[in-house]
Every structure is written in C-alpha cells, then in structure tokens.
Amino acid sequence: MNILIYCGARLGNDPLLQTTVERVGQAIVDRRWNLVYGGGGVGLMGIVARTVLQGGGHVTGIIPTFLNTAEVALNTCTVLHEVESMHERKQQMIAIADIIVALPGGYGTLDELFEALTWRQLGLHACPIGLLNVDGFYDSILALRDEFQRRSFIDDNVASMLTISDSIDTLFDALRDEHMSNGGPLPTQLERG
C-alpha cells in the first residue's frame, strides 16, 4: 500500500506536532506500507521520511528540479524522482498513491490537499483522502468545509470525500478499508511516473 503524505516543510513551534509526525512514520513502518511524499528533508516532511527510513521502510520522494538541492532534498530516499514542476510533482505523487493523508502544514499542504480533493471530485483519481486533525489543528478547515456545504457549494457526497480523525490508527484503518472496499487500486486519469 502506498500512502501519500502531505505535511509542512517547516517544523512549526509545537513539539506535539513533531512527535505526532514521528508516530505517523512509525505507523507506516508497522503496517509495512510505502511512503510517497514530496522528497524534502526539511520540516515535518523530513521527520516522517527519516522515521520510515530508520524503521526499514520504503520511501519514494518526488521533488521538482528547483528544490533538489543539498539544503532541501532528502537524498537518502529509497527512490528520489526529480521532475520539472510543482504540478508534475503533485500529479506523479497522486498517480502512485493508494491513499492520501494530510498532516499539519502551511499553504503548500493545503494546496496539495485541496487539489487532491478537487481531482477526486472530478473523477481524476479514486484515492481515499484523510486529514489527521492533531490537537484541533484543522478545525478551521472543517468549519470552512461545513460552510461550503451549508451554502451548497459542495454536497454531502463531496463533503464525505474527506475522512477526518485525530487518531492515526483510526484514520489509517478507515482509509485502508475504503481503499479495499473500492476493490483495491483503481484506474486513474493521471499519468503514472
């Protein structure tokens, strides 16, 4: 199972988030899943990737050329693909993913999350998408989703495309079950890298 993780390229100022990201990496190792992520060695994304690697897991990083520098890239990834653009990066990550999870992060994390949700709504992929709501980090986003729904910009079907939990195991189990109930890997309209 390939799990695509979106999260911050910064550490943030809350040690709880860093500890949680380490626990996410360990949960990926324990389940013998493969990590797919943006290829960076910095911030929370670096923590999750290094945790998986230290646990003997497989890590696929996909990084655009302009970020593939000694300061940013995690060159110890099992596989590190270099691509031309941010768009190609996001497209290739989703193309090889079975499930998608957003952890705490900033604008980049939200960009990836909302693009994945939009692409799923449009039928470009069928990956289950989850949001790990650590210590209420994403409460405002959930309120915004509810407002979109209340004002009829999204319906119940679209709103339910996002699985939310504050528990790693609960979230991972729900996404795995959704993936399996769909019959496993489904065709994607996105190019496989």
Image: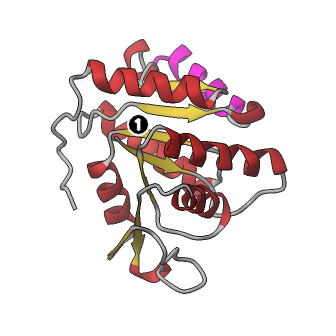
Q: Position of residue 181 (x, y in %)?
A: 28, 18
Q: Position of residue 5 (x, y in %)?
A: 49, 48
Residue type at mark 1: give it: Leu
Question: In the image, which residues are magenta?
Answer: 139-152
Q: Position of residue 189 (x, y in %)?
A: 17, 44
Residue 158 colored magenta?
no
- Circle 1 SS class: helix
Where 63 sits versus 53, above or below? below
Residue 147 colored magenta?
yes
Q: Residues within 10 Å of mark 1 (few under 14, many from 20)?
A: many
Residue annotated with mark 1: 117
Q: Position of residue 102 (x, y in %)?
A: 54, 42
- Residue at position x 43%, y 47% in the image: 4
Give the quadrant of the N terminus: top left
Q: Quadrant of residue 143?
A: top right
Where 170 sits versus 193, above or below? above
- Residue at position x 46%, y 37% in the image: 31
Give the quadrant of the C terminus: bottom left
Relative to 18, 151 lies left or right: left
**Main SS type for the magenta part?**
helix
- Residue at position x 45%, y 82% in the image: 66
Q: Quadrant of residue 54?
A: bottom right
